[in-house]
Image (spheres, rainbow, N blue to C red):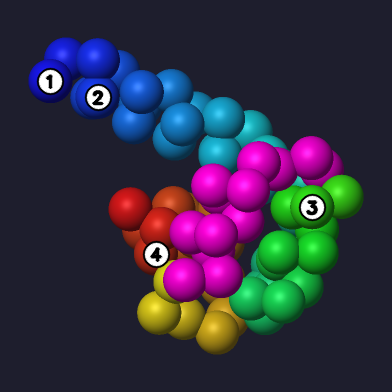
């Protein structure tokens, strides 16, 4: 259980780092394209693609949508 929580915290930190420097607001497609350019892994890209939003207003907005 602890390892799963530790991995989630680690992923969140990595995701926040990748979101730095991205221009917001951004549509889902724009965000995926920018994340791909920054080298995001397929897990993060899949989470963004599967989010129940079409536009994101900030890095925190993305993080809330992909939890």
Q: Secondary structure at mark 2?
A: helix
Question: Is residue 31 found left or right of 58 in the rendered image?
Answer: right
Disc ID at residue 37: none
The residue identified by callout 2 is 4
Q: Position of residue 56 (x, y in %)?
A: 56, 72
Tell whether position 47 is magenta.
yes
Please tell me which of labels 1 and 4 falls first in the chain.
1
In magenta segment, residue 3: no
* Residue at position x 80%, y 64% in the image: 33
Residue 45 screen position, x and y as percent: 61, 56
Crowd band around label 2 with a 10 angstrom C-alpha radius: few (<14), some (14–19), many (20+): few
Relative to 54, 50 lies left or right: left
The structure residue drawn at horizontal position 47% and vertical position 71%, both measured from the top left corner, is 50
Q: Are marks 4 and 3 in contact (CB under 8 Å)?
A: no
The mark lying in front, picked from 1 and 4, is 1
Mark 3, residues whose alpha carbon is within 10 Å: few (<14), some, or many (≥20)?
some
- The residues tagged by marks 4 and 3 sit, at their Cα atoms, a distance apart of 18 Å
Marks 2 and 4, the one that precedes in the sequence: 2
**Mark 2 and mark 1: span between their CA atoms?**
5 Å
Residue numbers of the magenta segment = 38-50
Q: CA distance from mark 2 to mark 4?
A: 19 Å
Instruction: Confirm or deny contact between disc 3 and disc 2 (CB under 8 A).
Output: no
Q: Which sits in the foreground, 31 or 58?
A: 31
Residue under label 1, please give it.
1
């Amino acid at each position: 259980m602890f390892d799963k929580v530790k991995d989630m915290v680690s992923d969140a930190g990595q995701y926040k780092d990748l979101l730095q420097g991205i221009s917001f607001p951004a549509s889902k497609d724009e965000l995926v394209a920018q994340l791909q350019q920054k080298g995001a892994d397929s897990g993060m890209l899949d989470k963004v693609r599967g989010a129940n939003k079409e536009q994101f207003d900030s890095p925190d907005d993305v993080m809330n949508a992909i939890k």
